[in-house]
Amino acid sequence: METFTIIPVKSGEFAPTAKGAFMYQEYWGVTINPVVIMYLIKGRDKVILVDTGCGDEERAKNYHHPLTRPVDERPANALKKHGVNVEDVDIVVNTHLHWDHCYNNDLFPKAKIYIQKKEMSFAISPLLTQVRFYETHQVGLTPGWLKAYDRIVAVDGDANLAPGIDLVTLPGHTPGFQGVLVNTAVGRYLIASDTVGLFENWEGIGIHKHVISGIHYNIADYYQTFEKMEKISDHVLPGHDPLVFAHQTYPY
Ligand SMILES: [Zn+2]
């Protein structure tokens, strides 16, 4: 079976954020600078992009959390540094529809966009705790992912995307969350995105083998998701951890 390498691509950095937003009920009073990450997978004949980053600094400041995103970290420019133009991207996968993971779907004119059906349904009418993350009408916005509505492929559960690449449902952070399981030379890498915001979420702390995100929809589902992840993956990649850039590619 084909093996792949995964390239983490940085597209901005948020102002200091409570670490507890990522590590539920841990690190009171501690802040970190979360980064926005897109994951690029270059196969033999397909270019796959997992998540498309967030809106610009203005939108971030007005509706979310202050962001620094230099010109060379705008999604199109950030990808160019890795030899990929926007029209080269064949497939976009959104792990979930929080604004910082799907805002730029429309930048990729030829890409089919894979999203879980359940996630789309929740994104239209989320719990009140998440309306800001989904940019719903309750906060006066129209979600960015709708700009590429005509190219969406609705996925219903676990699905094979290509030989060696699978979409796997990971409910917890959001109900229709999906990770991308990638066959590599050293085993299966799971792009877990916000299910594991930081490597530390997966590594655990104290009695907690793994730590759920401070942002969640269903904690019981989340723990079942952790059990599933232990079974199906050998390595896990996070949603917002600056430490991911310690290596240019995975495996390293
Ligand atoms: Zn999220």
Image (tube, rainbow, N blue to C red):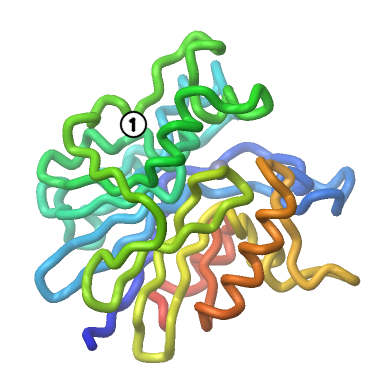
Horizontal arrangement in the rendering, residue 50 relative to residue 234 (left or right): left
Which residue is painted at 83% across and 68% down in the image?
208
Q: Nearer the viewer, residue 125 or 25?
A: 125
Task: Name the amino acid type tagged 1.
Answer: Trp
> Residue 144: which quarter of the image?
top left
Q: Is residue 2 left or right of residue 33?
A: left
Tag 1 secondary structure: helix
Residue 252 appears in the picture as rendered: no
The answer to whether 2 is drawn above or below residue 54 in the figure is below
Residue 180 image point, x, y percent: 40, 64
Q: Which residue is mark 1?
A: 145
**Front residue of 145 and 115:** 115
The percent coordinates of residue 24 (x first, y second) are: 79, 50
Q: Is residue 108 found left or right of 198 in the rendered image?
A: left
State the residue lying farthest toward the front: 156
Quadrant placement of the C terminus = bottom left
The quadrant in which the N terminus is found is: bottom left
Task: For label 1, count other residues whose C-alpha is less than 10 Å away and answer few (under 14), some (14-19) or many (20+).
Answer: many
Quarter of the picture for ligand 1?
A: top right
Residue drawn at (28%, 78%), measured in percent from left and top? Answer: 164
Q: Residue at x 69, y 40 (%)?
A: 16
